[in-house]
């Protein structure tokens, strides 16, 4: 039971952190709970499918299907997070501040919610498929009874959900005026971290084989995975901001490029909106 | 036959063609234990490990040091691409059975 608890907890935390951030980032946007629920449900269904066809997916692309699949869904999530941030920096920011949405704004808001639902779905799918494979393997092996395994799994989900709630309410403690900047910053780092992970998956598929020598190694200080509080902290930071204890130049380039692209696009969108409206900003 | 169709066919064929399981080294998993538990590879040179899972259940070859995670189903196999490594020891494990599934890649 303990092993299923630990594995489920670890995977659920990763998806839970992303869900917590998405919920905080969409504070005040109508119908966001529904969209996030769509994302979770879609992700769970996808996780079972991916687990069921793991071998089939793996044998595609000369045996690199798994790696290319992971890289693709991560890059999709990066695009969706970028789109959300850019949209929010336009009229979404104002809408979130005034806590009201009307007509066109609501429909535009739903487009951004759909993008974030995809991000949630991808997170649940990636972590969920590992949980499904692991629990299924456990069930096949016997040894532990199904009840103990289910109990471990359920406790893992609960503990993971608690972490998700913790980051959500933690973010909500930020004053409403600052919440947008805080979540926009977190989403930018989340996207950058995902891009760096996608680069790692492409490397594992045998692509991008130059610039692979790690630039530094901080595994002695904060390991990216492992036992103990340091390992847990490292893993949390890995999910949240893409912390890697041995980043290579290709990953660092992707990380910085995504931050630069998102910040640049947000500035451009804000500038476009400011010059577009003749109404002066209230002081 | 136009070029686009030809290229599409070629791409499909390459995508769907049977994977080439040809690692430089073979790593076998049985009863949640790796054989050999110590893999020797050449330093500063990318290599491929053919990971053969002879257990009934799936296993994830997992190594933070090697920056690799690869899930391979029961009675199945997969190629693990290892980047060019500086000389040293790089531990790996089977994430689903960490108590027994432990090993190390030694680059020299």
Image (tube, coloured by chain):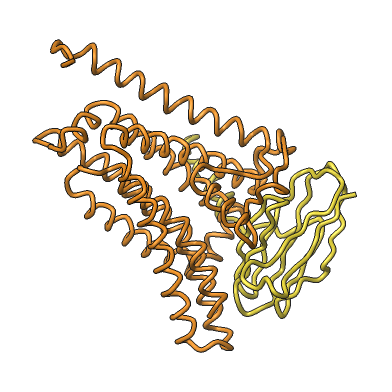
Q: In which quarter of the image is residue B50?
A: bottom right
Q: Quadrant of residue A140?
A: bottom right
Give the colour chain B carries in the figure.
yellow
Which is more toward the observer, B78 or A238?
A238
Quadrant in which the C terminus of chain A is drawn: top left
Which percent across, then down, holds residue A205? 63, 48
Q: Is residue A146 above or below residue B25?
A: below
Q: Is residue A277 above or below residue B60?
A: above
Which percent across, then down, holds residue A87? 28, 31
Which is more toward the observer, A258 or A48?
A258
Compared across the picture, whether A153 is left or right of A275 comes to right
Compared across the picture, whether A90 is left or right of A159 comes to left
Q: Residue at x 79, y 54 (%)?
A: B90
Q: In the displayed image of the protein, which residue is found farthest to the right? A: B108
Which percent across, then down, holds residue A270? 29, 20
Q: Residue at x 41, y 34 (%)?
A: A185
Q: Which residue is drawn at 21% across and 35% down?
A: A96
Which percent across, then down, holds residue B68? 66, 53
Give the chain letter for orange.
A
Which is more toward the observer, A275 or A108?
A275
């Amino acid at each position: 039971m303990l092993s299923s608890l630990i594995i489920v907890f670890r995977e659920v935390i990763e998806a839970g952190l992303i869900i917590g951030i998405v919920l905080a980032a969409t504070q005040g946007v109508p119908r966001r709970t529904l969209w996030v629920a769509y994302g979770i449900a879609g992700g769970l269904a996808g996780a079972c499918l991916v687990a069921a066809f793991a071998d089939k997916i793996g044998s595609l692309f000369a045996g690199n299907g798994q790696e290319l699949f992971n890289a693709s869904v991560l890059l999709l999530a990066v695009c969706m997070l970028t789109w959300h941030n850019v949209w929010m920096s336009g009229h979404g920011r104002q809408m979130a501040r005034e806590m009201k949405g009307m007509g066109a704004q609501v429909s535009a808001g739903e487009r951004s919610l759909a993008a974030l639902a995809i991000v949630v779905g991808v997170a649940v799918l990636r972590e969920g498929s590992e949980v499904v494979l692991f629990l299924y393997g456990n069930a096949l092996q016997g040894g532990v009874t199904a009840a103990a395994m289910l109990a471990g799994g359920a406790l893992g989900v609960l503990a993971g959900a608690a972490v998700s709630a913790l980051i959500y309410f933690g973010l909500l403690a930020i004053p409403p005026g600052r919440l947008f900047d805080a979540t926009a910053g977190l989403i930018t780092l989340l996207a950058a971290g995902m891009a760096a992970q996608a680069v790692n998956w492409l490397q594992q598929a045998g692509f991008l084989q130059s610039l692979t020598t790690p630039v530094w190694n901080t595994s002695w200080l904060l390991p990216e995975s492992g036992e103990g509080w340091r390992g847990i902290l490292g893993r949390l930071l890995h999910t949240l901001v893409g912390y890697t204890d041995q980043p290579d130049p290709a990953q660092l380039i992707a990380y910085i490029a995504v931050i630069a692209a998102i910040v640049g696009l947000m500035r451009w969108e804000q500038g476009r909106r400011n010059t577009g409206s003749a109404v002066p900003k209230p002081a | 036959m136009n070029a686009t169709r030809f290229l599409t066919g070629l791409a499909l064929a390459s995508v769907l063609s049977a994977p080439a399981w040809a690692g430089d080294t073979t790593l076998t998993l049985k009863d949640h234990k790796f054989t050999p538990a110590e893999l020797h590879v050449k330093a500063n040179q990318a290599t491929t490990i053919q990971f053969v899972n002879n257990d009934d259940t799936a296993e994830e070859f997992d190594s933070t040091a090697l920056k690799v995670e690869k899930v391979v189903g029961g009675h199945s196999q997969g190629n693990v691409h290892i980047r060019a490594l500086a000389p040293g020891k790089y531990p790996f494990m089977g994430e689903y059975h960490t108590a027994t599934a432990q090993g190390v890649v030694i680059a020299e």
